[in-house]
Image (cartoon, helix red, strand yellow):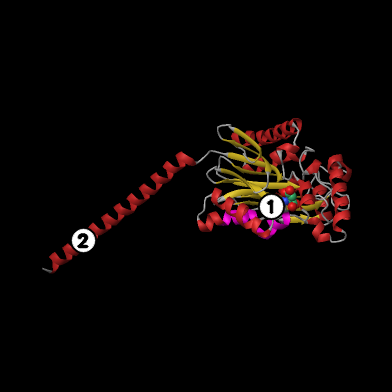
Amino acid sequence: MKHSIFFIVLLSICFCCTESVKTSSNQSENTSADTSENDMQTKAEFAIIIHGGAGTILKKNMTPEKELAYKAKLEEAIRVGYEILKNGGTSLDAVQKTINVMEDSPLFNAGKGAVFTNAETNELDASIMDGKTLNAGASAGTITVRNPINLARIIMDKSPHVMMAGVGADTYAKEQGLSIVEPSYFYTEHRFNALKRAMEREQIELDHDDKQAFYDPEIKDSKFGTVGCAALDKNGNLAAGTSTGGMTNKRYGRVGDAPIIGAGTYANNNSCAVSSTGWGEYFIRSMVAHDISALMQYKGLTLQEAAREVIHTKVPALGGDGGIVAVDKNGIMVAEFNTAGMYRATMNDKGELTIGIYKE
Ligand code: ASP
């Protein structure tokens, strides 16, 4: 009797174990089948999206030649990153090299075309972030570094720091052998004239109220052209970067959102990579780039939903404006802005190119 009870108990234990192993193996089979099916449907091999600044960019203020020039430069820039990604390069390299093209063009408010400060100087900001490691690099207020995004990258890769500013950042760039230029390299007539207009306006209309002058809508609109890029590479790694001269007529020493990790730039392989452009003070206060990532990670929003929430609700509620470009871990790309326009372009793994300027 004792033996037969023992035998029955043993049998039932064995049965239970087999069932539970079966169930769990079924579950894992189902999960992986679902995932790979989803992957096949939605996961792109790689993707790249760029912006060249957001603001009151209206067709009526644009000549056909100017429009063509912007489109050509956006295409030239994004194709550089696309080739890197297509050939199996990293998203970090794609972001950096794409931004270099726009930094070397006087069309954009970054590198060569940087806007002027109130002291008639050019002070440049940039940042880059690696979504795989969450490493980041940023530089603020440099005056001699030809390509600030390269300095941000080298700060990330070679220094123990995340952010360097002012004279120290310029010195570090020189020590690291980056291309150094005379401050006069950043002089462009159209940016200098924009500063003069902003200063005259400030003088006439706003007397001595510094803060108000900076917040004047017309003055802040002479800033277009910050550049940024977000990319996903074939290894599933996300990266983002942003480079800017800041805002016309900014006070010397002012730092915007572009070099602030979480505001101007953010990348995380678990969510997305984001580059911002717009009125920096509001983008810092809203932590725009990180907020989009956090809404995806903690609230389960899609990239599109998260970007809409931040750009159309959160930032305007404070009084700010601007936009973002972003890509998620599946290669879904989003360009969202609450201004009249934003220079932008995308390329997917099929080599399809889109370019936009206005609201379409
Ligand atoms: N966000 C930049 C800044 O505030 C300017 C811009 O994107 O247009 O410095």
Where does the image place residue 121, in percent across and percent down from the top left? 87, 49
The number of numbered discs placed on residues in the rendered structure image is 2
Is residue 290 one of those drawn in magenta?
yes
Kind of residue indicated by mark 2: Ser
Name the residue carrying label 2: 12
**Tag 1: Cα neighbours inside 10 Å, few (<14), some, or many (≥20)?**
many
Q: Which residues lie in the magenta part?
A: 280-294
Whole-angstrom CA distance, mark 2 to mark 1, is: 67 Å
Question: What element does badge 2 sit on?
Answer: helix
Is residue 16 one of those drawn in magenta?
no
Quarter of the image containing the N terminus?
Answer: bottom left
Q: Is residue 78 above or below residue 300?
A: above
Question: Could you tell whether 216 is left or right of 77 in the image?
Answer: right
Q: Is residue 83 above or below residue 7?
A: above
Where does the image place residue 146, in percent across and percent down from the top left? 81, 43
Give the image quarter of residue 203: bottom right
Between tags 2 and 1, which lies in front?
Answer: 1
Magenta stretch, main secondary structure, is helix
In the foreground, 337 or 265:
337
Where does the image place residue 352, in percent across and percent down from the top left? 58, 32
Kind of residue indicated by mark 1: Asp
Name the residue carrying label 1: 321
